Amino acid sequence: MSKQLTIRTMPQEDMLTSGHGACGGCGLSTAVNNVLRVLGPDTIVYAPASCFLVFSAQYPISALKVPFIYSAFENTGAVISGISAGLRRQGKASYVVGFAGDGGTFDIGLQALSGAAERNDDVLYVCVDNEAYMNTGTQRSGSTPFGAWTTTTPVGKVIQGKRQHKKDLMSVIAAQEVPYAATLSIAHPGDFLRKVEKAKGKRGFRFLHIMTPCTSGWKTEPSATYELARLAVETGMWTLYEIEDGAKRITYRPKEMVPVENYLKMQGRFKHMSKEDIETLQKWICKKWKMHYEPDMVSPVPRSEEEELSMVEEDNEGI
Amino acid sequence: MKVKVLSGDHAVAHAVKLCKVDVIPTYPITPQTLIIEKISDFIFDGEFDATFMHADSEHSAMSMAVGASATGVRTFTATASQGLALMHEMLYVAPQTRLPIVMANVNRSLGAGSGIWAEYNDSMPERESGWMQVYVEDCQEAMDAIIQAYRVAEDHRVMLPMMVCLDAFVLSHTVEKVLVPEQSEVDAFLPRFRPMNYLDTSNPKFINIAVSPAHSMEMRYQMDHLMRGVAPFIDEVDEEFSKMFGRRYGGVIEEYRMEDADYALMTLGTATSTARVAVDELRAEGRKVGLIKLRFMRPFPHERLRRALEHVKAFGVFDRSISMNGFGPVFTEARNSLYGTGVPVTDHIAGIGGRDLTVQMFKEMFQRIEDSVKGGGRDCYWHGLRGEQI
Ligand SMILES: Cc1ncc(C[n+]2csc(CCOP(=O)(O)OP(=O)(O)O)c2C)c(N)n1
Ligand code: SF4
């Protein structure tokens, strides 16, 4: 097996150049840039309506060095399938990737996503999940966590924040038995790069779900992005695993469950949360934690001690 | 050339095969289904080398068509009614991004008061989208219009998508004798698709990104300008088509017994065949009537129409759709064409929801048109209503 990519050996050429219009500390731009670095210049990008679309290009300038097309909000799964079909028809092997937000994936785009997965079209679908409709000003999506403030789940006198838990999208994808699906965090770059590389090396429908902290929608400091992404995993708000040809593997397991409050208190969107609501969220996390980390059900990827050490070292560097 | 007995839908499917289309995303809807079923038969039997895509909806089918066409391959899809409505958002992408997708739309009524029969209320609202629209009269024209459509759409002076519209059942499911051209003839008429701008990693470009007010108005202006200038190319292609295949359709409009006509009616789709009979019978009675077959709703043939009607005393327009405020869309366009000429123009709405159209009905329309020169009548008549509504 060829040597796996690390933060030191990864391609350094940016496909998303600096000067784009994302907010400072945007987790989404970091995620997109690093996925594209691994995919390289022979890649065609589709962006639905989202922050990514708006911050990466405005006629007549673009921050992307690769070909790029947009058409609507709900059709990432379908457009990338069409691009892939057109390319394969001409014997071209370029990678086709769609970067859709959580709204464009969990909600309005679910049908087209599921269609592409069911047909096993040869595409990479990346959901950059900032847990709300950010481009239209932080409205709630199916991905927004329980309790969170958004502009359509405001902190009212009677109801405070969102009343439903985050949709388990990965389970929906997993149920469709796709060749590869994985969850990623920008705070775990070693794991991140390995998963992107793995997705790159496979054919058929591949899905990457990346948690991407958002400074303006989460009401956080730009400097906190990395720490938030890290804490999300340590608290169990986000779990890192992959599903390869039906086999699910946890790829990182926190040593112990950090109370969710530590994560919540760093973010303006949760600052109103009552004790009861925090408890409700914590209970939900415990259930999920059990589901993902229960040793009988899944086991971490077996690795040599040396590998494990280098991973920890890398994952502390950030990308 | 072979002679085959084909339905309108199957004629379209044969044409798609003859045009060597590369990618065909599809989603079924009555009465379009015969098209995609036949195409899938061709492909699954190995008779036609194309990529058939099973979309999860019409919105996705058009999204796939946009994606595929943007890579520079010849693309086709087909729909009707509710399916076209679901595509609405995506229809606006192909023209502005200059993707020459060809789509068959089998015209059928839309929405509540649902029915699956012929009516143009599905495609007429989409005339604002930037798609060219041709309405065909019979199975032969359905086949030929697809071949012509690719030739026009892919011309570098045009590069716009085209919708080939055929009447539900009256045409989609009616079988007729059709002359099917040889592959070599179609190859000689229709060159390989040469895309202009496409997704290519060796020459990265972006297609359709956010546009500020500083540029968007010019882009719309250019599109409008382009559409207004397309009619001559359509006439040109029809002329070349006639040299190769021996059949001509007149380009954007076809005139029938118009040479010395005092009174003219304009029809579109299968109604034209019925109206021709009415014209022949009235001519036999010595009435100086003529017929204009409207082929293209976009580009609308304003100039050709004005020229064709220079000598008429009165003009009527048949509409198989209604723009809920008194008039049909074809009438509105045609009256614009004739604005300032002083020729009285009346609207004749009939055949709504698949209601039968009879020769007698078209004779009544001509009577109303003749009467309109005296003044005092109405602008808009509904023909064939049951009961006491009128
Ligand atoms: C059919 C349709 N409905 C609504 C919109 C408005 N819209 C544009 S972007 C957007 C939110 C995008 O949210 P998400 O997918 O989560 O991406 P983010 O902006 O957060 O990156 C919405 C609602 C649209 N463009 N199209
Ligand atoms: S709103 Fe959030 S996701 Fe969008 S650009 Fe800003 S930080 Fe990034």
Image (cartoon, coloured by chain):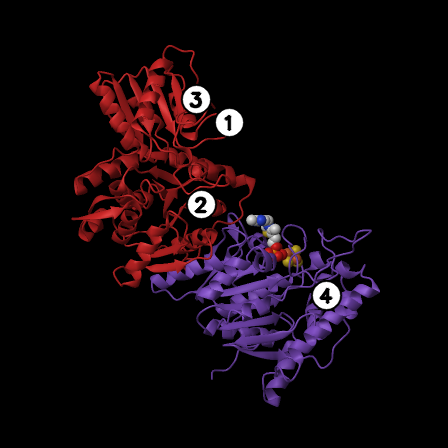
Q: Alpha-carbon distance for marks 2 and 4? A: 47 Å
Q: Which residue is mark 3?
A: B380
Image coordinates for residue B308, horizontal then vertical, percent: 29, 23
Q: Which label sits in the foreground, 3 or 4?
A: 3
Tell me which image quadrant ligand 2 sits in: bottom right
Q: Quadrant of residue A270?
A: bottom right
Secondary structure at numbered mark 4: helix
Q: Are marks 3 and 4 on the same chain?
A: no
Q: Whole-Å distance between the Cαs marked 3 and 4?
A: 68 Å
Side of A62 relative to B61 (left or right):
right
Amino acid type for the residue under numbered disc 2: Leu
Q: Label 4 sits on what residue type?
A: Ala
Residue in the foreground of this view, choosing between B260 and B35? B35
* Residue at the extreme bottom of the image, as rendered: A305
Work out whether residue A21 can be spotted. Answer: no
Coordinates of residue B106 in the picture (x, y in percent): 37, 43
Q: CA distance from mark 1 to mark 2?
A: 22 Å
Colour of chain A as rendered: purple
Residue B110 percent location from the top left of the image: 46, 41
Q: Position of residue B63 (x, y in %)?
A: 45, 53
Q: Which residue is mark 1?
A: B325
Q: Assign a secondary structure to mark 2.
A: helix
Q: Residues within 10 Å of mark 2 (few under 14, many from 20)?
A: many
Q: CA distance from mark 3 to mark 1?
A: 11 Å
Mark earlier in primary sequence (3, 1): 1
Choose between B252 and A13: the one closer to the eye. B252
Count of numbered circles on the image: 4
Q: Residue A51 occupies which quadrant of the picture?
A: bottom right
Q: Which mark is residue B84?
A: 2
Label 2 to label 3: alpha-carbon separation = 28 Å
Residue drawn 59% across the image and 63% down it: A128
Residue bearing the label numbered 4: A224
